[in-house]
Structure formats: C-alpha cells, structure tokens
Image (spheres, rainbow, N blue to C red):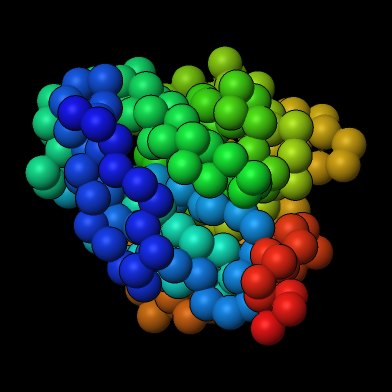
Amino acid sequence: MNPPAFPTDATATLTLPGPAGVLETIVEAAEAPERDAVAIVCHPLPTDGGTMHNKVVTMAARALRESGIATVRFNFRGTGASEGSFDQGRGEADDLRAVAAWVREQRPGARLWLAGFSFGSYVTLKCANELHPGMVISIAPPAAGRNWDFSTLTPPQCPWLVIQGEEDEIVDPQAVYAWIDSLKLDPPPELVKMPETSHFFHRRLMDLRGAIKNGIRPHLPPETEGAASA
C-alpha cells in the first residue's frame, strides 16, 4: 500500500504500512502557535490492555499539542486494528521505526520527538539514538522486572524528561531512580517525581499534563513560519 499524506485535519485516523501489516494511527494537529515538530506517543503493554487510547497516552498527547506540537499515536502490532502479533518489544520497535520514517518522509523539516508510557517508554528508548529525536519523554519507564532489559539501552543524546509516580504499583519508583543514577549522565535527564501518584496517574492526569508542559518548555522548537507571521 502507498503511505498516506500527513493530514491537515484537526484529527485524522490513518492506516500506515508496517513491518507486520497495517498500523492503526491517529494524527492530531497542534494548537496555535504551531511548533516545527511532530511527537510520536507510544502506548503501554498490549498484553495488559494497553492501546493508543490509554488515558495517560492521550493526556501526554494533549499536553504536547497544547504546547504547539502535532502528535501521532498508533497501535502496536496485534493491538486494535493493527495487524500482526505481540513481539516482546522487538517488533514493536520496528513498528515505531516505520511510523517515524513516515513522519520524516511527510514532514521532512519537522523535528521528531518521542514519548512513551510504561512499555511504550521502553520501545522509544530502544530506538532513540537510532532515530535521533529532538526530545524524549519517558513516563513510568519499567526499569525493573517484566523482562525489559534496560541495561542494554543507550540513553538518548538529546533533552530527556522522565516522569515517575511515587506510589506506582507496577513500576518500582526506586528502581527507576537507581537506573537513572547508574547512567551517570552529565547533564542527567530531568526527573519529575510525582507524589501520591499511581501507575495510571489516577486523579493526577492534570498534574501529568502540567509536568510535561513545564518540562518541555525550555526545549520547544521555533514556531512554524505561518504561526510566527499570524
């Protein structure tokens, strides 16, 4: 199939060609003033019911759009209308690569940003240095357990925001902090610890929105030419 053009509508549902079949995708336009970037937001573990409609994923995408960045959400293989079957993060990384290639083909001048929640953050980190994003946002990265080997991940060479709930019942917050410390990065990623916050940010979604908007503000790319002249 021929890949579709990048939509100009406020919201568009697309079918993109992926390595295991079609990928169900939603593209949403940025709010004014638009910035010269597109963010791909990846969802949590499909085998636990994670999809691109997850409330943390949609809130992260909302925060990005409100900051002027268009967003792309998609279902990993075997999820929703996306073809294929779950592949323990390997094939899902290939799915992300395919979506990123489409974004860059359709929006060659725009900076690519990557964001992910839980398993989605693992997938984005697997691909980060290969895709050379302008910004990475990791929400509750599963740094311990679940068979996701974070020791093999190379930290992104770009601004990096990590947001972790301090009462996360699925991802051990202390394991996340220890993993970040073990990287010995200079500068380290910006780490936002959210007190009284569970894995799915129950009653804390608006706080998550604010944390994302505040964290990315220093790294926002320039406004697009049309937005600047409006």
Question: Which residue occupies the foreground of this view, 207 or 34?
Answer: 34
Estimate the x, y position of residue 146 in percent, counting from the top left: 35, 30
Q: Nearer the viewer, residue 188 or 110?
A: 110
Residue visible at 36% across and 58% down in the picture:
7
* Residue at the image point whose x is 49% and y is 35% from the top: 105
Residue 22 in the image, given as x and y percentages of width and height: 18, 33
Judging depth in this view, the residue of 46 and 2 nearest the camera is 2
Q: Nearer the viewer, residue 51 or 146?
A: 51
Is 121 displayed left or right of 50 in the figure?
right
Residue 137 seen from this side: no
Relative height, residue 139 to residue 93 (above, below)? below
Q: Quadrant of the N terminus?
A: top left
Count of numbered labels shown in the rendering = 0
Residue 130 occupies quadrant: top right
- Where is the C terminus found, in terms of image quarters? bottom right
What residue is rendered at 65% in x and 71% in y?
Answer: 226
Residue 128, visible in the rendered structure: yes
Q: Considering only vertical position in the picture, is 52 above or below 64?
A: above
Residue 205: x percent and y percent?
A: 43, 75
Residue 117 appears left or right of 192: left
Residue shown at the point (61%, 54%) measured from the top left? 37
Residue 4: percent from left, percent from top: 29, 43
